[in-house]
Amino acid sequence: MWSEFEHQVMERAVTEAKRGHPSPNPRVGAAIVRDEQILSRGYHHEAGQAHAEVDAIRNAGGASAGASLYVTLEPCNHHGRTGPCTEAILEAGIARVVIGCRDPAPHVPRAIDRLQRAGVVVEVGLMERECTALIADFAKHHRTGLPFVTLKAAVTLDGKIATRSGDSKWITGQVARTEAHSMRDESDAVLVGVGTVLADDPQLTVRHVEGRDPIRVVLDADLRTPPTAAVLDSRRESGAETWIFHAPDAAPARRDALRGRGVELIAVTRDARGVAIPEVLRILGQRDVVRLLVEGGSHVHGTFLDLGLADRAAIFISPRIVGDPNAISFAAGSGAESIEQAWRLLHAKVRALGSDWLIIGDLERTP
């Protein structure tokens, strides 16, 4: 139905979409084409700014009349912080619109009908799986109110994230670590447990690539985070916030010490594992955290898996072997009783990153 060139155009639109940080809106990319030449590209930069279609139309510099618009997501058909993209498309004189996937949560439905009634040719489904995956975070947040959760870790070939002494620097090489920082840039928030703070003293900021820092989230039931922890450092120009979720009965003196560092303390229910992660996720979702990157450690990963709260895993694998049963594993949860019940990755993709590999895919488990 669609030509190789058209697939290439939509691939460019998908790439454009990934440049944006529009949470809680979906990431969308677009391209305008005439005579098998791309006239312009666009994407939704930030919430409240022009949508991808309008960005591409503007970048075309008045040359959109009679052209084809390729867009990863069905155009909007409502007045919000910006006007309807359907009207912008009609005003620009676009003759044909090729849509990757339909909007799972349109504010005003029948955008396609609106365009077709005006004489625009509309086709839907080019690279539908890729375009649907692009908005999986938005779709989940709209459906459940919860963030889309990705578990991220660097492991050895025998699945260890640190030695028995806690040493983990560095399991992977520079290329893989740079990719990990790109993942932080793409996320609204990055989450760790207090064990990781105490063991590694991470900054949880974006440093190896150009990007913006995510909100830094720490699970710390008893507020053991030291006031000197790097995760509390707010001197960076980004002003990245730090939120610490703790139990209501955490010591008042510890609260006072951390408040002096400008951190936001959020009390949630205590459970057998520490703080109640389902409650943490509800609060994050209410605060428009749509893309959550969970960087561990082992018990945090295990808890997310045990509770079925993780959507995706991104595992960096190093060609190293620790060879120690007491070394720290990727996930220390209840685990599966059989291989058939183990978590598996769907639509998994594998990439070589220097001497390391990245495997990423959606999590699924047989009940």
Image (cartoon, grey):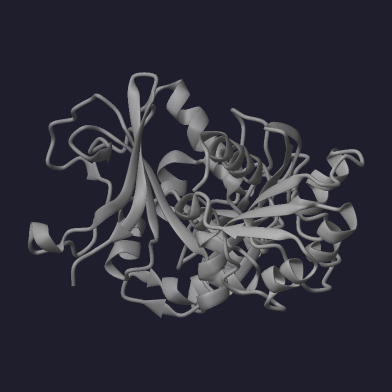
Quadrant (top left, top right, bottom left, bottom right) of the C terminus: bottom left
- What is the residue that sits farthest to the left in this orientation? 338
- Above or below residue 333? Residue 16 is above
Q: Where in the figure is residue 50, as x and y percent of width and height?
A: 82, 54
16 with respect to 1 (left or right): right
Q: Nearer the viewer, residue 71 or 138?
A: 71
Q: Where in the figure is residue 155, as x and y percent of width and height?
A: 29, 37
Q: Is residue 230 visible?
A: no
Taking the spot 76% from the left edge, 71% from the top edge, the residue there is: 117
Q: Nearer the viewer, residue 61 or 345?
A: 61
- Above or below residue 311? Residue 295 is above
Give the image quarter of residue 241.
bottom right
Give the image quarter of residue 185.
top right
325 with respect to 276 (left or right): left
- What is the residue that sits farthest to the top in this orientation? 354
Q: Is residue 257 visible?
A: yes
Taking the spot 61% from the left edge, 74% from the top edge, the residue there is: 105
192 with respect to 111 (left or right): left
- Above or below residue 311? Residue 324 is above
Q: Where in the figure is residue 209, as x and y percent of width and height?
A: 62, 29
Q: Nearer the viewer, residue 101 or 95?
A: 95
